Image (cartoon, rainbow, N blue to C red):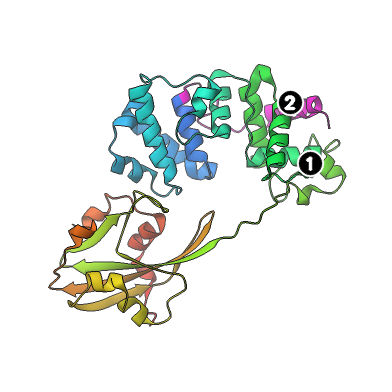
Amino acid sequence: MKSTHFRKNLLEWHAANDRPLPWKGEKNPYYIWLSEIILQQTRVEQGLPYFERFKENYPRVKDLADAPEDEVMKMWEGLGYYSRARNLHATAKNIAYNLDGKFPDSYEEILKLKGVGPYTAAAIASFAYNLPNAVVDGNVYRVLSRTFGISTPIDSTDGKKEFAKLAQECLDVKQAGVYNQAIMDFGATHCTPKNPNCQSCLLSEKCVGFQESRVENLPVKSKKLVKRNRFFYYLVINAGEKVLVKKREAGDIWQGLYEFPIIETEQTVTNRNQIEGSETWHQFINESDYSVLRVSKAYKRVLTHQKISIQFWEIQVENFKNDYEKAGFIAISRAELVGLAFPRTIDLYLSDKSLSLELF
Ligand code: SF4
Protein backbone atom coordinates (compact mmCIF):
# COMPACT_ATOMS: atom_id res chain seq x y z
CA MET A 1 0.00 0.00 0.00
CA LYS A 2 1.32 3.40 -0.93
CA SER A 3 0.54 6.36 1.30
CA THR A 4 -0.94 8.25 -1.70
CA HIS A 5 -3.32 5.39 -2.43
CA PHE A 6 -4.29 5.16 1.22
CA ARG A 7 -4.94 8.90 1.49
CA LYS A 8 -7.01 9.10 -1.70
CA ASN A 9 -9.25 6.17 -0.79
CA LEU A 10 -9.62 7.22 2.80
CA LEU A 11 -10.82 10.68 1.78
CA GLU A 12 -13.15 9.16 -0.77
CA TRP A 13 -14.63 6.93 1.93
CA HIS A 14 -15.02 9.92 4.23
CA ALA A 15 -16.79 12.02 1.62
CA ALA A 16 -19.42 9.30 1.32
CA ASN A 17 -19.62 8.42 5.03
CA ASP A 18 -19.35 11.66 6.94
CA ARG A 19 -20.74 11.30 10.48
CA PRO A 20 -22.61 14.44 11.51
CA LEU A 21 -21.38 15.40 14.98
CA PRO A 22 -21.83 18.77 16.69
CA TRP A 23 -18.09 19.51 16.91
CA LYS A 24 -17.37 18.67 13.27
CA GLY A 25 -16.38 21.65 11.18
CA GLU A 26 -16.01 23.61 14.44
CA LYS A 27 -13.22 26.18 14.26
CA ASN A 28 -13.37 27.49 17.80
CA PRO A 29 -10.34 25.85 19.48
CA TYR A 30 -12.01 26.06 22.90
CA TYR A 31 -14.97 23.92 21.75
CA ILE A 32 -12.67 21.53 19.90
CA TRP A 33 -10.54 21.13 22.99
CA LEU A 34 -13.68 20.53 25.12
CA SER A 35 -14.93 17.84 22.75
CA GLU A 36 -11.53 16.15 22.55
CA ILE A 37 -11.05 16.00 26.31
CA ILE A 38 -14.59 14.71 26.82
CA LEU A 39 -14.15 12.05 24.13
CA GLN A 40 -10.88 10.65 25.50
CA GLN A 41 -11.68 7.11 26.66
CA THR A 42 -15.39 7.82 26.12
CA ARG A 43 -17.80 6.66 23.43
CA VAL A 44 -19.22 9.40 21.18
CA GLU A 45 -22.82 8.65 22.21
CA GLN A 46 -21.89 8.93 25.88
CA GLY A 47 -19.82 12.09 25.45
CA LEU A 48 -22.31 14.02 23.30
CA PRO A 49 -24.68 15.26 26.04
CA TYR A 50 -21.68 16.27 28.18
CA PHE A 51 -20.24 18.32 25.36
CA GLU A 52 -23.58 20.10 24.87
CA ARG A 53 -23.90 20.74 28.61
CA PHE A 54 -20.39 22.18 28.98
CA LYS A 55 -20.84 24.36 25.91
CA GLU A 56 -24.17 25.66 27.16
CA ASN A 57 -23.04 26.32 30.72
CA TYR A 58 -19.56 27.60 29.86
CA PRO A 59 -19.77 29.24 26.43
CA ARG A 60 -16.36 30.88 26.87
CA VAL A 61 -13.16 29.54 28.33
CA LYS A 62 -13.40 32.19 31.06
CA ASP A 63 -16.81 30.88 32.11
CA LEU A 64 -15.27 27.47 32.68
CA ALA A 65 -12.26 29.00 34.45
CA ASP A 66 -14.51 30.89 36.87
CA ALA A 67 -16.80 27.96 37.68
CA PRO A 68 -16.41 26.42 41.18
CA GLU A 69 -14.50 23.11 41.11
CA ASP A 70 -17.37 21.17 42.68
CA GLU A 71 -19.70 22.41 39.94
CA VAL A 72 -17.31 21.28 37.18
CA MET A 73 -16.86 17.89 38.83
CA LYS A 74 -20.62 17.53 39.19
CA MET A 75 -21.08 18.31 35.50
CA TRP A 76 -18.44 15.71 34.66
CA GLU A 77 -20.05 13.10 36.89
CA GLY A 78 -20.56 9.76 35.14
CA LEU A 79 -17.84 10.27 32.53
CA GLY A 80 -15.07 8.65 34.58
CA TYR A 81 -11.33 9.36 34.42
CA TYR A 82 -11.82 12.42 36.60
CA SER A 83 -8.28 13.70 36.19
CA ARG A 84 -9.55 14.92 32.79
CA ALA A 85 -12.07 17.19 34.51
CA ARG A 86 -9.46 18.57 36.90
CA ASN A 87 -7.03 19.22 34.04
CA LEU A 88 -9.82 20.79 32.00
CA HIS A 89 -10.56 23.21 34.79
CA ALA A 90 -6.87 23.99 35.47
CA THR A 91 -6.21 24.57 31.76
CA ALA A 92 -9.24 26.85 31.42
CA LYS A 93 -7.85 28.96 34.29
CA ASN A 94 -4.42 28.99 32.66
CA ILE A 95 -5.82 30.17 29.31
CA ALA A 96 -8.17 32.71 30.89
CA TYR A 97 -5.65 34.25 33.26
CA ASN A 98 -2.12 33.53 31.98
CA LEU A 99 -2.73 33.58 28.24
CA ASP A 100 -5.16 36.51 28.15
CA GLY A 101 -8.05 34.22 27.27
CA LYS A 102 -6.46 33.38 23.93
CA PHE A 103 -6.22 29.70 23.01
CA PRO A 104 -2.68 28.82 21.79
CA ASP A 105 -2.46 28.53 18.01
CA SER A 106 0.60 26.35 17.39
CA TYR A 107 1.00 22.62 17.92
CA GLU A 108 3.92 23.13 20.33
CA GLU A 109 2.03 25.65 22.47
CA ILE A 110 -1.15 23.56 22.51
CA LEU A 111 0.92 20.58 23.63
CA LYS A 112 2.09 22.55 26.67
CA LEU A 113 -1.47 22.70 28.05
CA LYS A 114 -2.15 20.46 31.03
CA GLY A 115 -4.01 17.28 30.06
CA VAL A 116 -3.19 17.69 26.37
CA GLY A 117 -1.02 15.00 24.77
CA PRO A 118 0.29 14.70 21.21
CA TYR A 119 -2.97 13.23 19.89
CA THR A 120 -5.21 15.99 21.31
CA ALA A 121 -2.72 18.70 20.30
CA ALA A 122 -2.70 17.42 16.70
CA ALA A 123 -6.49 17.22 16.65
CA ILE A 124 -6.90 20.82 17.90
CA ALA A 125 -4.11 22.17 15.66
CA SER A 126 -5.55 20.54 12.55
CA PHE A 127 -9.26 21.10 13.20
CA ALA A 128 -8.99 24.70 14.40
CA TYR A 129 -6.04 25.99 12.37
CA ASN A 130 -5.59 23.33 9.64
CA LEU A 131 -2.00 22.83 10.79
CA PRO A 132 -0.25 19.78 9.27
CA ASN A 133 -0.12 17.55 12.34
CA ALA A 134 -1.32 13.95 12.00
CA VAL A 135 -3.32 12.44 14.85
CA VAL A 136 -2.16 9.09 16.20
CA ASP A 137 -4.53 7.27 18.53
CA GLY A 138 -5.87 3.72 18.90
CA ASN A 139 -7.95 4.06 15.73
CA VAL A 140 -4.97 5.26 13.73
CA TYR A 141 -2.68 2.49 15.03
CA ARG A 142 -5.27 -0.09 14.05
CA VAL A 143 -5.99 1.30 10.59
CA LEU A 144 -2.34 1.83 9.65
CA SER A 145 -1.08 -1.46 11.07
CA ARG A 146 -3.72 -3.36 9.10
CA THR A 147 -3.58 -1.48 5.81
CA PHE A 148 0.23 -1.37 5.71
CA GLY A 149 0.67 -4.79 7.38
CA ILE A 150 2.92 -3.50 10.18
CA SER A 151 3.45 -5.84 13.10
CA THR A 152 5.83 -3.67 15.15
CA PRO A 153 4.20 -3.50 18.63
CA ILE A 154 2.31 -0.23 18.97
CA ASP A 155 3.33 0.08 22.63
CA SER A 156 7.07 -0.16 21.89
CA THR A 157 9.34 2.86 21.36
CA ASP A 158 10.13 1.71 17.83
CA GLY A 159 6.47 1.15 17.07
CA LYS A 160 5.48 4.60 18.31
CA LYS A 161 8.13 6.21 16.11
CA GLU A 162 7.28 4.11 13.07
CA PHE A 163 3.55 4.79 13.26
CA ALA A 164 4.01 8.51 13.96
CA LYS A 165 6.22 8.78 10.88
CA LEU A 166 3.81 6.84 8.68
CA ALA A 167 0.80 8.81 9.96
CA GLN A 168 2.59 12.04 9.06
CA GLU A 169 3.47 10.69 5.58
CA CYS A 170 -0.14 9.76 4.88
CA LEU A 171 -1.55 13.10 6.08
CA ASP A 172 -3.10 15.40 3.48
CA VAL A 173 -1.33 18.59 4.53
CA LYS A 174 -3.67 20.80 2.50
CA GLN A 175 -6.69 19.57 4.42
CA ALA A 176 -5.18 18.19 7.58
CA GLY A 177 -8.37 18.63 9.64
CA VAL A 178 -10.55 16.75 7.16
CA TYR A 179 -7.96 14.00 6.79
CA ASN A 180 -7.57 13.53 10.55
CA GLN A 181 -11.33 13.37 10.98
CA ALA A 182 -11.50 10.83 8.14
CA ILE A 183 -8.98 8.40 9.61
CA MET A 184 -10.54 8.61 13.06
CA ASP A 185 -14.05 8.00 11.68
CA PHE A 186 -12.78 5.18 9.50
CA GLY A 187 -11.22 3.44 12.50
CA ALA A 188 -14.24 4.07 14.72
CA THR A 189 -16.95 2.92 12.31
CA HIS A 190 -15.44 0.84 9.50
CA CYS A 191 -12.06 -0.69 10.34
CA THR A 192 -13.29 -1.51 13.86
CA PRO A 193 -11.43 -3.65 16.44
CA LYS A 194 -13.89 -6.53 16.00
CA ASN A 195 -15.67 -7.42 12.78
CA PRO A 196 -14.17 -4.75 10.51
CA ASN A 197 -16.15 -4.26 7.31
CA CYS A 198 -13.50 -5.71 4.96
CA GLN A 199 -16.05 -7.06 2.50
CA SER A 200 -17.13 -3.60 1.42
CA CYS A 201 -13.93 -1.65 1.87
CA LEU A 202 -12.37 0.70 -0.66
CA LEU A 203 -8.95 -0.27 0.67
CA SER A 204 -9.32 -4.05 0.70
CA GLU A 205 -7.55 -4.69 -2.63
CA LYS A 206 -4.35 -3.15 -1.35
CA CYS A 207 -4.85 -3.68 2.39
CA VAL A 208 -1.93 -5.89 3.42
CA GLY A 209 -3.66 -7.16 6.56
CA PHE A 210 -6.71 -8.23 4.55
CA GLN A 211 -4.76 -9.71 1.66
CA GLU A 212 -2.55 -11.72 4.01
CA SER A 213 -5.43 -12.70 6.34
CA ARG A 214 -3.76 -10.96 9.28
CA VAL A 215 -6.50 -8.48 10.13
CA GLU A 216 -7.40 -10.16 13.41
CA ASN A 217 -3.77 -10.16 14.55
CA LEU A 218 -3.19 -6.46 13.96
CA PRO A 219 -2.25 -4.20 15.63
CA VAL A 220 0.28 -6.01 17.82
CA LYS A 221 0.79 -5.12 21.49
CA SER A 222 3.82 -6.38 23.40
CA LYS A 223 2.60 -5.99 26.94
CA LYS A 224 -0.48 -7.47 28.42
CA LEU A 225 -2.05 -5.17 30.95
CA VAL A 226 -2.35 -6.73 34.40
CA LYS A 227 -5.25 -5.25 36.31
CA ARG A 228 -5.04 -4.77 40.05
CA ASN A 229 -7.97 -6.10 42.12
CA ARG A 230 -9.37 -3.79 44.80
CA PHE A 231 -12.28 -4.25 47.22
CA PHE A 232 -14.07 -1.18 48.61
CA TYR A 233 -16.53 -1.40 51.47
CA TYR A 234 -18.36 1.86 52.07
CA LEU A 235 -19.98 2.65 55.41
CA VAL A 236 -23.11 4.66 54.74
CA ILE A 237 -23.51 5.92 58.28
CA ASN A 238 -26.92 7.38 59.12
CA ALA A 239 -26.40 9.61 62.11
CA GLY A 240 -29.76 11.19 62.84
CA GLU A 241 -30.82 12.81 59.57
CA LYS A 242 -27.28 13.05 58.23
CA VAL A 243 -24.70 10.90 56.48
CA LEU A 244 -20.93 11.31 56.43
CA VAL A 245 -19.03 12.04 53.23
CA LYS A 246 -15.56 13.22 52.34
CA LYS A 247 -13.80 14.39 49.20
CA ARG A 248 -11.23 11.92 47.87
CA GLU A 249 -7.70 13.20 47.92
CA ALA A 250 -4.86 13.23 45.42
CA GLY A 251 -2.82 10.15 44.60
CA ASP A 252 -5.59 7.72 43.70
CA ILE A 253 -8.58 7.31 41.41
CA TRP A 254 -11.63 9.60 41.72
CA GLN A 255 -9.70 12.52 43.15
CA GLY A 256 -12.03 15.40 44.04
CA LEU A 257 -15.16 13.22 44.13
CA TYR A 258 -17.04 12.48 47.32
CA GLU A 259 -17.34 9.14 49.08
CA PHE A 260 -18.45 7.56 52.37
CA PRO A 261 -16.01 6.25 55.00
CA ILE A 262 -14.20 3.42 53.28
CA ILE A 263 -12.60 0.11 54.22
CA GLU A 264 -10.35 -1.17 51.48
CA THR A 265 -9.15 -4.78 51.39
CA GLU A 266 -7.06 -6.84 49.01
CA GLN A 267 -9.49 -9.72 48.97
CA THR A 268 -13.20 -10.07 49.20
CA VAL A 269 -14.57 -10.01 52.76
CA THR A 270 -16.21 -13.29 53.77
CA ASN A 271 -16.97 -12.58 57.41
CA ARG A 272 -18.68 -9.49 58.85
CA ASN A 273 -16.08 -9.37 61.63
CA GLN A 274 -13.58 -8.20 59.01
CA ILE A 275 -15.74 -5.08 58.57
CA GLU A 276 -16.79 -4.60 62.18
CA GLY A 277 -13.25 -5.19 63.39
CA SER A 278 -11.69 -2.72 60.97
CA GLU A 279 -10.00 0.53 61.91
CA THR A 280 -12.53 2.59 59.95
CA TRP A 281 -15.40 0.92 61.77
CA HIS A 282 -13.84 1.74 65.15
CA GLN A 283 -13.09 5.27 64.05
CA PHE A 284 -16.70 6.00 63.15
CA ILE A 285 -18.98 3.58 64.93
CA ASN A 286 -16.83 3.36 68.00
CA GLU A 287 -18.88 2.48 71.07
CA SER A 288 -22.16 3.81 69.65
CA ASP A 289 -25.30 1.73 69.43
CA TYR A 290 -25.76 0.70 65.86
CA SER A 291 -27.66 -1.59 63.60
CA VAL A 292 -26.69 -2.69 60.11
CA LEU A 293 -29.74 -1.82 58.02
CA ARG A 294 -28.58 -3.53 54.83
CA VAL A 295 -25.60 -4.67 52.87
CA SER A 296 -25.71 -4.10 49.14
CA LYS A 297 -24.66 -6.44 46.41
CA ALA A 298 -21.06 -6.03 45.19
CA TYR A 299 -20.93 -3.56 42.31
CA LYS A 300 -18.15 -4.13 39.79
CA ARG A 301 -16.12 -1.39 38.12
CA VAL A 302 -13.41 -2.07 35.58
CA LEU A 303 -10.95 0.76 34.95
CA THR A 304 -7.90 0.72 32.71
CA HIS A 305 -5.58 -0.60 35.40
CA GLN A 306 -7.90 -1.82 38.11
CA LYS A 307 -10.87 -4.05 38.79
CA ILE A 308 -12.89 -2.79 41.73
CA SER A 309 -15.60 -4.49 43.73
CA ILE A 310 -17.71 -2.03 45.73
CA GLN A 311 -20.17 -2.84 48.48
CA PHE A 312 -22.23 -0.54 50.69
CA TRP A 313 -23.03 -1.11 54.33
CA GLU A 314 -25.87 1.06 55.49
CA ILE A 315 -25.72 1.59 59.22
CA GLN A 316 -27.98 3.36 61.67
CA VAL A 317 -26.07 4.87 64.59
CA GLU A 318 -27.72 6.18 67.76
CA ASN A 319 -26.17 8.94 69.87
CA PHE A 320 -23.56 9.62 67.27
CA LYS A 321 -20.58 11.34 68.84
CA ASN A 322 -17.53 11.56 66.69
CA ASP A 323 -14.91 14.09 65.66
CA TYR A 324 -15.36 13.19 62.01
CA GLU A 325 -14.54 16.77 60.96
CA LYS A 326 -10.94 16.25 62.05
CA ALA A 327 -10.75 13.40 59.55
CA GLY A 328 -12.04 15.72 56.80
CA PHE A 329 -15.65 14.46 56.74
CA ILE A 330 -18.82 16.50 56.55
CA ALA A 331 -22.26 15.44 57.74
CA ILE A 332 -25.01 16.30 55.29
CA SER A 333 -28.64 15.40 54.67
CA ARG A 334 -29.60 12.91 52.00
CA ALA A 335 -31.26 15.70 50.04
CA GLU A 336 -27.91 17.51 49.88
CA LEU A 337 -26.14 14.46 48.48
CA VAL A 338 -27.54 15.15 45.00
CA GLY A 339 -25.52 18.36 44.82
CA LEU A 340 -22.20 16.54 45.20
CA ALA A 341 -20.16 14.73 42.57
CA PHE A 342 -19.69 11.04 43.33
CA PRO A 343 -17.98 8.19 41.48
CA ARG A 344 -20.50 6.55 39.18
CA THR A 345 -20.98 3.46 41.35
CA ILE A 346 -21.96 5.53 44.38
CA ASP A 347 -24.50 7.38 42.26
CA LEU A 348 -25.84 4.09 41.04
CA TYR A 349 -26.15 2.82 44.58
CA LEU A 350 -27.88 5.97 45.80
CA SER A 351 -30.44 5.78 43.03
CA ASP A 352 -31.09 2.05 43.30
CA LYS A 353 -31.90 0.85 46.77
CA SER A 354 -33.85 -2.10 45.41
CA LEU A 355 -30.57 -3.90 44.86
CA SER A 356 -29.89 -4.18 48.58
CA LEU A 357 -29.61 -7.57 50.19
CA GLU A 358 -28.26 -9.26 53.27
CA LEU A 359 -25.08 -11.15 52.64
CA PHE A 360 -24.04 -12.38 56.05
S1 SF4 B 1 -9.87 -4.22 4.33
FE1 SF4 B 1 -10.51 -4.56 6.41
S2 SF4 B 1 -8.67 -4.35 7.62
FE2 SF4 B 1 -8.25 -3.44 5.62
S3 SF4 B 1 -8.73 -1.30 5.90
FE3 SF4 B 1 -10.56 -2.26 5.11
S4 SF4 B 1 -11.73 -2.76 6.95
FE4 SF4 B 1 -9.65 -2.37 7.60
Q: Which residue is mark 1?
A: 150
Residue at x-position 21% and y-position 75%: 286
Disc 2 versus disc 1: distance between alpha carbons?
15 Å
Residue at x-position 80% and y-position 35%: 203
For residue 58, which quarter of the picture? top left
Point out which mark residue 141 bears: none
Tell me: residue 164, above or below residue 215.
above
Q: Which residues lie in the magenta part?
A: 1-29
Q: Residues within 10 Å of mark 1 (few under 14, many from 20)?
A: many
Residue at x-position 58% and y-position 23%: 126
Residue 192 in percent (x, y) is at: 69, 45
| SS type, badge 1 | loop
Q: Which residue is mark 2?
A: 169
Tell me: residue 294, above or below residue 331.
below
| Residue 247 inside the magenta-drawn segment | no
Residue 24 in percent (x, y) is at: 55, 28
Residue that sits furthest to the front in the current view: 157
For residue 211, which quarter of the picture? top right
Between 339 and 353, the one lying in front of the other is 339
Q: Pick the quarter of the image with the C terminus.
A: bottom left
Residue 260 in percent (x, y) is at: 30, 62
Amino acid type shown at disc 1:
Ile
For label 1, being within 8 Å of ligand 1 is answered no
Between 200 and 72, the one lying in front of the other is 72
Residue 223 in percent (x, y) is at: 67, 54
Q: Pick the quarter of the image with the N terminus.
A: top right
Residue 254 is left or right of residue 133, and the answer is left
| SS type, badge 2 | helix
Residue at x-position 57% and y-position 29%: 123
Q: Of the residues under marks 2 and 1, which one precedes in the sequence?
A: 1
| Residue 5 inside the magenta-drawn segment | yes
